Amino acid sequence: MEVTSGSAQTNLPITFGQPFRSGDLATSQGLRAQDSVGNTVPLQMDEVSTHKNGSVRFAVLSASVPSLPANTARIINIYPATKTTSSVSLPASPAWNLQVTARLSDGSTLVANPQQALQQAIASGSNRRLHGPVASEFNIVAPMINQSTGAAHPHLVARLHTRLYQSGQIRTDVVMENNWALKASPSDLSYSLTVTANGQTLLSQPSFTHHHKARWHKVVWTGAAAPNVRVRHNMRYFLDSRATWNYNLGLSIPESVLAAEASSLASRNTGPMGTAMLTTDMPGTGGRSEIAPVPRWTAMYLISQDDRARASMLANADAAASAPVHYRDHETDQPISVIKYPNLALRYGSSNPSVPTASTSSTWKPDIAHQGSYAYIPYLITGDAFYLDEMMFWAAWNIAANDPAGRGTSQGHMGSEQLRGAAWGFRSILEAAFAVPDNHPQKTYFRTIANNNISFFNSNFTATTDTQYVFPLGGLKGIYNNNQIPGYENDFFMYVTAWALENGETGMQATFNNIARYIVGRFTSAVQAQGFCTSKGAHYWNESRSGSTALSSWAAYASANGDGPSCGTVANGDGAYPDWAGGYAAVSRGMLGAAANAGHSDAPAAYTRWLTFTPNLGTDFKNDPSYAIVPR
């Protein structure tokens, strides 16, 4: 880790996420840390999730940097060590004394005074997320009490992720939720909000409208000012952990691109219910920055770790919280589950139990097929509970939004989604299955749903004959598009399949092997020798049949889809745009890199070959690296 502070500081507390390569750290081990000038750095590890082999996959780390000169980078090196148990002493009644006050448009005032709840949590060790010699964090759920009636508001709740550092600073992530799934009479709520502590106003939010099934948050500090600090990961190791795809760290994002990102963000609404750079009409056509394995701003951050890219990534993750996809079960206090409610329907079909609807409608039109990965990398970078919850909410909605019959009721599979929806929906489920801590009550849920999807794909995507889902060459059909083959959607699905395999999901191997016959095969010289032009490999929609006859050879496939006598040496399929980082040629190039990383024997050569068909893409990847994924 590299830590930089804008001012000289001592005992600087930092908390961040850290992924680990499979096999690098056993759960029986601990960690130790030392900075680049030889100081021992107190370090603790929490919120552990594990790989399939039982080694640590991800953890939230908290460190206390002994001294840090102003504007001087300090490297924090982290090593495996013998696990130790440190005694932790917390004040019985911290000088927190937070008060959250909401003044509703109807004139009523709601107040939460959670000091006693924090004291009880400290005494009992309940609702504790982080705990060690550096930091302890408690999740305090505070009902908003009507001052006049003494009754708790039925929908508005404050969730206070309260982190007590041994240095004396207290960090509170104030999360306001209006998202009970099954409580009657949900509605939009208009209110202003103030947060005070010990006579000081920490947050003053003017009146706005908080939509139902949405949430927002703001971090405040007590005890001392917020640390002025920047943390950067060893990004080579971060990517080598397989936590995400292998983005090209050799790219240099131009200053002009980063400056434009900051300027664009500054012009957007990033306040409560603001949508930042996100598209709220999600089913709408056209490319957008969030549709890729990770969004453009996230890829920019992974490559540059620039503060402006980080600000954009986190602002857009926050904006995703304003979408009406946040359904919390009041009985479990967790995102809604189709295992508990097999016939729940949040978007299509008849729901049992019924889901109360509000009289107001959101400007958002949530969708699975055009969905970004909003909170996964922000959680891996920060370790913040807000992004962990956000990641789970989107995955849970993707599962429950499909018609119960189409998803196999409690199975929660993506079979009834269009292919790109199956890809991005499965990605969100894997994100949760991978990153949710092993001791979290939702871990088993997302792991089970991930396994169910793998079983579904192996049952339906491995045929070598013409079926509802696959045609004989291995390509996946658009199930609602008359047996056509959407090339770019096949690439999307391969991204997720390859990433699953990189993360030890060996159950995906059969699906991967079968669909790669087409998805990777269309870029190989062997297929071109059989009559299909490599230059046509990146495309929009192609036919899988000639009349009623399934196309079972590459020559027949080429003929049915208009390949001429000359193949050409530059990508020229419908929508390929070989010089544009948002075109289908770019989508395919990154896909081939991902397939190579998953171990496909033909993919490295296909990737190298496709480079010659897309010679100018590298230049535009500097402007938009969404698909700048390369072989490891």
Image (tube, rainbow, N blue to C red):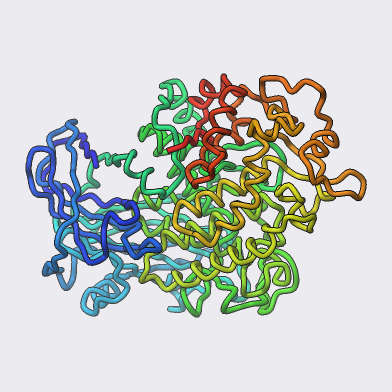
- Quadrant where the image shows the N terminus: top left
Q: Quadrant of residue 539?
A: top right
Q: Residue 313, image x and y in percent?
A: 45, 41
Return the residue nearer the eye: 287 or 227.
Answer: 287
Q: Residue 32, image x and y in percent?
A: 15, 54
- Quadrant where the image shows the C terminus: top left
Q: Could you tell me which residue is drawn at 61 percent across and 56 percent down?
A: 511
Q: Residue 138, image x and y in percent?
A: 29, 67
Q: Could you tell me which residue is drawn at 36 percent across and 71 percent down?
A: 439
Q: Could you tell me which residue is drawn at 46 percent across and 51 percent down?
A: 502
In the figure, 591 relative to 366: above or below? above
In the figure, 159 relative to 379: above or below? below
Q: Could you tell me which residue is drawn at 51 percent across and 27 percent down?
A: 621
Q: Quadrant of residue 101?
A: bottom left
Return the residue nearer the eye: 564 or 296.
Answer: 564
Q: Quadrant of residue 565?
A: top right
